[in-house]
Every structure is written in C-alpha cells, then in structure tokens.
Image: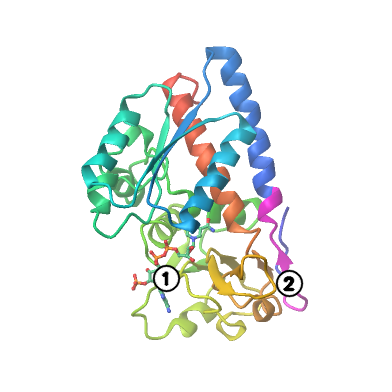
Amino acid sequence: MSVVVNTDRAATIIDGKSIAEDIRLHIAEEVHQMKSTVGHVPGLAVVLVGDRRDSESYVRYKTKGCEEVGIKSLLAKLPGNCTENEVMDSVARYNEDPSVHGILVQLPLPKHMDEERILSVVSLEKDVDGFHPLNVGNLALRSRKPLFVPCAAKACIELLLQSGIELMGKHVTVIGRSKVVGLPTSLLLQRHHATVSVIHAFTTNPEEITRESDIVISAAGVANLVRGSWLKKGAIVIDVGTNPVEDSTSDYGYRLTGDVCFEEAVKVASAITPVPGGVGPVTIAMLLANTLDSAKRVYGLSD
Ligand SMILES: NC(=O)c1ccc[n+]([C@@H]2O[C@H](COP(=O)([O-])OP(=O)(O)OC[C@H]3O[C@@H](n4cnc5c(N)ncnc54)[C@H](OP(=O)(O)O)[C@@H]3O)[C@@H](O)[C@H]2O)c1
C-alpha cells in the first residue's frame, strides 16, 4: 500500500491488521523452512508476574501469535508477591534453555521490583523486546547495530515504510520518551535520517511542535491528547496509544482508544492508523519477527 499525501479529503486509514497478516504469513513460511532444514522451530518464553488483566491479555495475544506461525511459546507465571530473585531465576532458566530464542518479561512488573535489574539479566542474544541496555545503546550509536529493536518502535517504522512514506529529511514528532516506545522510536527514526522532535510531559508547547511536523507518532498513553488542531494539513499520524475508556455499551465496560482524537484528525491528516487495528497487531508481528531472527542467528540461517 502506498499513501498519496492528499490535502483535501479524509485521511487514508493505514490497515495495521492486514500489514501484520502479511508479515505473519512470511514468518510462518520461514518457520516451516527452518523446521525442514534444521529440525527446530523458534521458541519464545514469556515471564508474567502478577495478575494484571491487561498484561494477561497482552500475553494471550503474543501466545496466539506464536501458535499461528508455528513458533513454540513457553510461559512462566509467577504470583505478584514473589521475590525479584524468583523472577531472575525464571529468566536465567530460559537463558540456559536452547529451545528458547527469545525471552520477554511482561511489563510493568510489581512496584516492589527493580525492573532494570531484572531486564539486564535477559541474555543479550535472547532480548527480543530490545530493552537490554546494550541493545538500547547500540540502537543509539549509528556505527553499531543492535541485535534487537523494541517491537512497537519497529512497528511504527514498518507501518510508515509499508505505506510508501519516505522518512529521510522528514520532520517527525514523537510524543513520549519511554524505553518501550518513545525513546527507541526516536532513535530508529534518526537511523532512517528523519529530523526528530520529542515531546514529553514537561514540553510547554506540544501543539506548536506537532503542527510543524510531517509525521506525528504518539505514545503518551493519554486518550484524545492530540486534537485535529495539533496537526498540519496532510500530516501522517501513527497512534501507538492504547487507552481504556469507560464504555457502558461494551461487554467489558470499556473500550480501547488511542492518543489521537480520531474523528478530528481524520479530517486533517493524509493518513492515520486506527486504534485498535493499527500499531498493535504489527507490534506483535515484530515480536515474532525478532524471535525468528534470533533463532536464525543460532542455526546459522541469517542472511
Ligand atoms: N500498540 C502497541 O503495540 C503498544 C505497545 C506499547 C505501548 N502501547 C501504548 O502506548 C502508550 C505509551 O506507552 P508507554 O509504555 O510508552 O507509556 P509510559 O511509559 O507511561 O510513557 C509515556 C510517555 O508519554 C509522555 N507523556 C505522558 N503524558 C503526556 C502529555 N500529556 N503530553 C506529552 N507527553 C506525555 C511521558 O512523559 P515523561 O517521560 O515526561 O513522563 C512518557 O515519556 C500507552 O497507551 C500504551 O498502552 C501500545
């Protein structure tokens, strides 16, 4: 799909579901080939601590994604009151397991745990979330290559590239600077030669900055933060936000909405991702892709 920047009609909706479906089909083929060539399939292990409903449902999506493409999935589920050492032991066991090529610790962890300490135990070669400090550092250094790039950041770039949107020289604003989305997205965009502005909770003039941007990527976690008036006519909008808002008409009592006020933005932007059905499915596809890449490195099948 190629997006033609238009300035006088409603935005093209970038279909994350169908982009993710194509990526998954390609991964499934490669997994099948790997099985026939070396007799192994990639393995992804998830460490889930506590019983947050949102985390449990994200883990279910990831497990289902693995099943669909033939990747083996393993899950270590620990109670919320376990110790930091118990979580690190689970990670260490997966580090040693040769059938596991990717390990992810579902975030957020309970408040009493030191997230950075736990994440730094994940083997660099199995860090499919890309949160290990060395992978983050290598992403930041143009002369180095990280083994893994965080999945949501990769998904944003994939959605733009698959939509035929050029990044070199474009002014892109990223809203958010977290290690999960905002920071790696801004670093990855620079590797694609975009000029990047980063907005965070202390930025005093966010609208002025976004209004000058060719592309706006929002990952603030604030429903309807970005209004139509924040956008330049014809801008491209990638909405990473996934925010639960009350909805009595929904079976669950809530629905998910993005950071961007879709109804307003669709009238100003030239292309926009919906929530749900935009960044989310592609993020999961990128996790599967990272796990496949890791297994290919282990079995000497990398390009
Ligand atoms: N679709 C997907 O695949 C996917 C994947 C991951 C996350 N998400 C969603 O993306 C959103 C962000 O996730 P996250 O993990 O990055 O969240 P996070 O760790 O809470 O980070 C939020 C970032 O947004 C900034 N921010 C918060 N309020 C703001 C405001 N009013 N104006 C400007 N900046 C603001 C914060 O600034 P400070 O640094 O100054 O505090 C922070 O850098 C969430 O809705 C999450 O559910 C979606």
Give the spatial CA distance, label 1 vs label 2.
23 Å
Asked where in the image residue 265 lies, by quadrant, the reply is bottom right
Q: Is residue 296 visible?
A: yes
Q: Which mark is residue 197?
A: 1
Rendering colour mode: rainbow
Q: Is residue 15 located in the magenta-colored stretch of the structure?
A: yes
* 10 Å crowding of disc 2: few (<14), some (14-19), many (20+): some
Within 8 Å of ligand 1, the CB of disc 2? no
Q: Which residue is mark 2?
A: 6
Residue at (53, 69) in percent of width and height:
243
Give amino acid for label 2: Asn
Residue at (78, 76) in percent of width and height:
9
Above or below for 211 versus 34: below
Q: Secondary structure at mark 1?
A: strand
Q: What's drawn in magenta, residue-wise?
A: 7-18
Instruction: Give left or right: position of 15 versus 230.
Output: right
Q: Secondary structure at mark 2?
A: loop
* 10 Å crowding of disc 1: few (<14), some (14-19), many (20+): some
Above or below for 27 versus 5: above
Residue at (45, 19) in percent of width and height:
300
The one of 220 and 158 positioned closer to us in this rendering:
220
Q: Is residue 123 visible?
A: no
Give amino acid for label 1: Ser
Above or below for 38 versus 71: above
The picture places residue 270, in percent across and down from the top left corner, at 69, 71
Residue at (62, 82) in percent of width and height:
228
- Sequence order check: which comes first, mark 1 or mark 2? 2
Q: Is residue 72 located in the magenta-colored stretch of the structure?
A: no
The picture places residue 108, in percent across and down from the top left corner, at 37, 56
The picture places residue 81, in percent across and down from the top left corner, at 28, 52
